Amino acid sequence: MAVIDPIILFFLLGLAASAMRSELRLPAAVYDFVSILLLLAIGLKGGVELARQPFGSLLPQMLAVVLMGSMLPLVAFPVLRLIGRMNRADAASIAAHYGSVSVGTYAVAVSWFDARQIDFEAHMPLLLTLLEVPAILVGIVLARGLSRETRWSDVAHEVFLGKGIVLLLGGLLIGWIAGEDGLVSIKPLFIDLFKGFLAIFLLEMGLIAAAQLGTLRRHGVFLLLFGIGMPLFSSVVGAALGWGLGLSVGGTAMLAVLAASASYIAVPAAMRISVPDANPTLSLTASLGITFPFNILLGIPIYYALAQQLHAWLGS
Amino acid sequence: MSNDHTRKLVTIITEAALEHSLLRDFKRLGAKGHTITEARGSGHRGVRSAGWESNSNIRIEVICNEAVAQAITQHLQDQYYANYAMVVYSSDVSVLRPDKF
């Protein structure tokens, strides 16, 4: 096994190319296509697993995860307000980013786990999908209260019919209906090529993340500390919940990864519509420029070690 | 060219996130159609490079009569100028089929 996963090297290539002001940029359509494939592939894998187990047995986990997604922004918000001295809209928007999840981080974690043959509960994509939404709603309420001005129909449209949810849910349903045997014919594209597409996705993410770092200098040390401290805190919450729900070590680590990851697709779009006075540069710098690189370069091994420790201390 | 054939071309360059709500507003204000193209560039809100969705821009063009153009620009000024990256300008254009706009 290589010391460093090649897909991570693609991310570093993107970072370096952007830092050196290379002309390299992927066409937007390529990024769209690759992210669509990743979302569908993750959904399909989870859907196959859902077909195997009774849906009812997953309900407690689903509820617990939704609760976690709603609580994390409530922890982040006062920290951003009081220590970061941010205005209400900015604090609420950033809090929402950190309560929601990043599918890219999940995909890298899947690849990391696969390379080390670590098993985890295969219905994780369902929990991933569920975690996208609650933080957005909490963030909007934190920013504006239950104001009549909020056009909830627009928010619902943005949240539930955004690319992420439609493709993840769609993939889950297709995988669930078709089952493992039914998916054999499309497996070469979605499953076998997963890592190749992930590599291209990470190349682009490297380019984007480096572009965000330029703004970091203006927003200073607090954002940097928050972008690293918040995922570390969230990972402990996620790992504790995973243990409490009786997940395996791998599953516990994966829930820690989900809790630690910060959204950079679904939440920014929803916040732009619903909390327009929040500065999108702040939240994107934190989630994309700091937390995403931290999670995929250092975070995932840390969260796995955390899950192992937790199971060792408390018993499985 | 008779004056009847003159219409206003209103061009809006703004964040792609607004597409849905802007088109609904324009329809309500009386625009009969629109054209959207992807756009990129820079301004006082920094480079909008269209590298990915949260950072992409669109250019909306609406051809309409003077009154509708007024209503649209006023509405944009009231609702969106403060918080969004947005450039709006209008110009006179001559059209071949005035009844269409």
Image: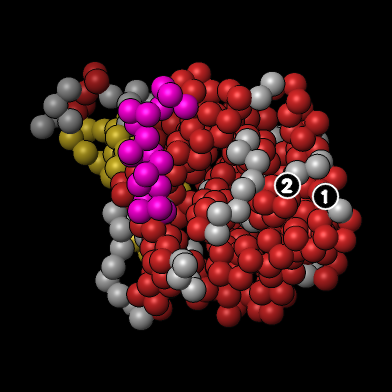
Q: Was residue A194 drawn as part of the magenta stretch in this picture?
A: yes
Q: Which residues are magenta?
A: A180-198
Residue A3 rendering spot, x and y as whole percentages? 49, 73
* Crowd around label 1: few <14 · some 14–19 · many ≥20 (10 Å): few
* Residue behind mark 2: A248
Given residues A86 and B95, the one toward you in this image is A86
Q: Quadrant of residue A41?
A: top left
Q: Amino acid at mark 1?
A: Ser
* Residue behind mark 1: A316
Up the image or down, A72 lies above or below A42; here it is: below
**Are discs 2 and 1 less than 8 Å apart at CB?**
yes
B74 to the left or right of A283: left
Given residues A190 and A141, the one toward you in this image is A190
Residue B37 bears which disc, if any? none
Given residues A172 and A51, the one toward you in this image is A51
**Chain to which the residue tagged by mark 1 belongs:** A
- Element type where label 1 sits in the image: loop
A29 to the left or right of A300: left
* Crowd around label 2: few <14 · some 14–19 · many ≥20 (10 Å): some
Given residues A176 and A25, the one toward you in this image is A176
- Residue furthest to the right: A314
Q: Amino acid at mark 2?
A: Ser
